[in-house]
Image (cartoon, rainbow, N blue to C red):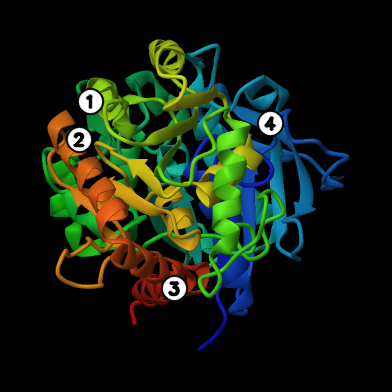
Amino acid sequence: MDKLKLLMAASEVVPFAKSGGLADVTGALPKALRALGHDVRIVMPRYYIVDREKYALKVLEGGLGVPMGSMGEVWAGVYEGVLPGTDIPVYFIDHEGFFGRGGLYEENGFSYIDNDSRFIFFSRAVMQLAKKLRFNPDVIHANDWHTAAIPMMLNTHYAYDGDFAYTGSLLTIHNLQHQGHFNKGAMELLDIGWDHFNADEIEEYDGINLLKGGIVHADAISTVSRKYAQEIRTAEFGWGLERLIDINSYKLHGILNGVDYDEWSPASDPFIAQTFDSESMEGKKICKKALQSTFGLPERDDIPVIGLVGRLVEQKGIELIVHAIHALMHMELQIVLLGAGEKWAELFFSDIAGRYPEKFRCYIGYRNDLAHQIEAGSDLFLMPSLFEPCGLNQIYSLRYGTLPIVRATGGLDDTIENYANDSVHGTGFKFYDATPDALINTVGWALYTWYNDTKGFQQMQRNAMERRFDWNQAAKEYEALYYQIKRGRRGE
């Protein structure tokens, strides 16, 4: 098959800027696609946190004119660099008014009031940059609401532009909760025609919903796990768009994210006290002792350690943990938590650490080295998410022989095989109801297994460490989808 020309448009990309899993995907997937031989290029905003000198960014000669409807033509600069360690071009749209700020989408807990203008501008700039570069992509891969305007623009403003005559679009939904709701006045900036302001396309409650419009106009839609693709067609997980997504389910695909095993591997991890692998687990015991020491817990090998790493927000099930915590503290266990988020939650867990100093410790904030040490030194890892499009920490945990305790939703359900008491199968422990009792009972089940079925627990650890969810497989699934989009656009 002919190699593809692919343009990845995203609001954040690792290592340049990150607020969540979107950046991990857009920083890793292009590498795997490039390894398959495709011409992949990335476009993102040049936030002022992106250091031009550190990444050796060069100015692309000539300005970039970006039509913005009633605002007229807005001019931007473009910087060019590469994804570190690769030859993949990364283009940065530079506009001080829109992106010269302290945050990506918000500051001090408040969203920027002009986020509609910022990302409509960015979406249009992606199109204009492709024209400037004379790069005619087979597929533009848009991600979340920030670039969901691109499929709409392809089918309207650029529908008869020869540069995009055969260009298709893929829209990946990383988290349906965030949709891009704005005042209908933004239609004047989109410049796609008011006839598209209707309930079947972009209109919602007399405003606009950018993600909704992208779903309608994209040639294909993907989510970051198979289970999540099913879930978002239901009222529980659809955030009001379940009917629309169900109508468009013929073009919906679930492709599970991969992880970077070069970074997350206990056999070579530079952040942990002792490396280890599934053939020799002695190093994990050393990592456990080091983790207990780092967090000021009693250094005991006769008690299981449960790790938690993540944002302290409702989605992650923190309220379930809050209501279960005192019951958990009466069990024979230790818990270490690394995370930040809602202020009340930070204060609550800090207080619990003071009340139960020999059983619970936390670090409020984020440190990459501690995240690695928790994965390596814990026996179990808790992820009670209310919803989880994919999730990465449970996959990291598998690699480190740290058995996940998860709510069976989204990517957590796809990646974890439930323990069966009468067999040596399984890689973790699942519960289904989003209740404190379900969490408590499943933690109790995991502890019982640790204390009373040592051989079964160790076999699960080996099972877990042998599982692989890498980007090579995910890239091949995306590749097949890109070819399908290309054939569809060409009428083949």
Instruction: Name the kind of residue labelled 3 in the image.
Output: Glu
Would residue 463 be seen by someone viewing this image from the given angle?
yes
User: Rounded to the nearest whole Å, what is the CA distance between mark 3 and mark 4?
Assistant: 39 Å
Q: Nearer the viewer, mark 4 or mark 2?
A: 2
Q: Which mark is residue 401?
A: none
Left or right: residue 470 compared with residue 185: right
Q: Are marks 3 and 1 in contact (CB under 8 Å)?
A: no
Percent coordinates x, y for residue 343 in the rendering:
44, 12
Q: Earlier in the sequence, mark 4 or mark 2?
A: 4
Q: Earlier in the sequence, mark 1 or mark 4?
A: 4
The residue singled out by tag 2 in the image is: 440
Q: Secondary structure at mark 2?
A: helix
The residue singled out by tag 3 in the image is: 466
The residue singled out by tag 4 in the image is: 47
Position above or below: 387 against 485: above
Extreme residue toward the bottom, this view: 1
Q: Are marks 1 and 2 in contact (CB under 8 Å)?
A: yes
